[in-house]
Image: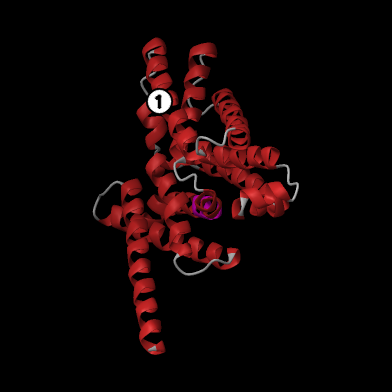
Amino acid sequence: MLQLLEMLGLPFLACMMMGAILGYSGIHVLKREVIFIDIALAQIAAVGSLVAHLAVGAEEGTLVAYAFSFGCVLFIAAFYALVRRRIIQISIEAVIGISYAIAAAGALFLIGVSGHTHMEEMLAGSLLWTAWPEIKWSLIVFCAAGICFYIFRKPLLSISEDYHAALTKGVKVVWWDFLFYALVGIVITVAVRIAGVVVVFAFLIIPATTSALFSSRWSTRMLIAWTAAVIGSIGGLLFGYYLDFSLGPAIALFLGGVLTIAALFSKFRVIRSVNMIE
């Protein structure tokens, strides 16, 4: 038991932090229909890190590298917010996909120029080797983002629920969209360094999707999303530990399993309700 805690204690703590902030963010993401925002922002943040390495020799994980990554995230957040407001012919999801493709191409170019060979590690994460400094730094960032989400919840919720209705009410949608994408981007940048793109995407989308099967109320959806994240994390960590399997994919698989079971249960509940009515 002691060895289990020593090996999985910090990874579990990291999963709980990511599950909390990404579970909430994921509900917004689903309502805004920007599903692939995770991989796009992660790729753009990686480009920022590569630029930092090429321009000033900054190593991965340093404050300078994070500053460049955050700068790229803030730039693209402003771009997404403006595009959604000004360009109606193209969906924001298409713009996100295009930006991902451009960022991926740019990253490959920068790797060739700089000789930076750790791109795969940057996007794959190292959940098993999570250390206290990473936990502390992530906790600061996630708490700051969570506080912002809470303080500005009314305009952010209004836009997520109905963008055009919020616009009609006079909500400054460009500014609040910028804040939303910036917060999500900063959270994803930090989370990807710990767990990798796949796990972060799973935490962002799967618990939120699970919650959508059972309720439309925000408070209920948050509770369900967090519960799904906890179950998937515990199952994935134990599975990976005892069967010597990579922790990241194991967690993603178990989160997928939670969603599958929830979907079957939801379907069974609907069928049972219909039969009772008949």
Depth check, front residue: 121 or 149:
149
Q: Is residue 179 above or below residue 244?
A: above
- Location of residue 121 with respect to 266 vertically, above or below: above
Residue drawn 52% across and 50% down? 22
On whether residue 260 falls in the magenta region, the answer is: no
Left/right of residue 242 with respect to residue 161 in the rendered view: left
Whether residue 13 is situated above or below residue 224 in the rendered picture: above
Q: Considering the image in quadrants, where does the C terminus appear?
A: bottom left
Q: Is residue 264 above or below residue 137?
A: below
The amino acid sitting under disc 1 is Ala
Q: Quadrant of the N terminus?
A: bottom left
Left/right of residue 43 with respect to residue 171 in the rendered view = left
Residue 178 coordinates in the image, percent (x, y): 64, 37
Residue in the foreground of this view, choosing between 136 and 54? 54
Q: Position of residue 60 (x, y in %)?
A: 48, 25
**Which residue was labeled with disc 1?**
104
x, y percentage for residue 76?
57, 29
Residue drawn at point x = 42 percent, y = 12 percent: 114
Residue farthest to the left, as pictured: 243
Q: Secondary structure at mark 1?
A: helix
Work out whether residue 1 can be spotted: no
Looking at the image, the residue that sits furthest to the front is 89
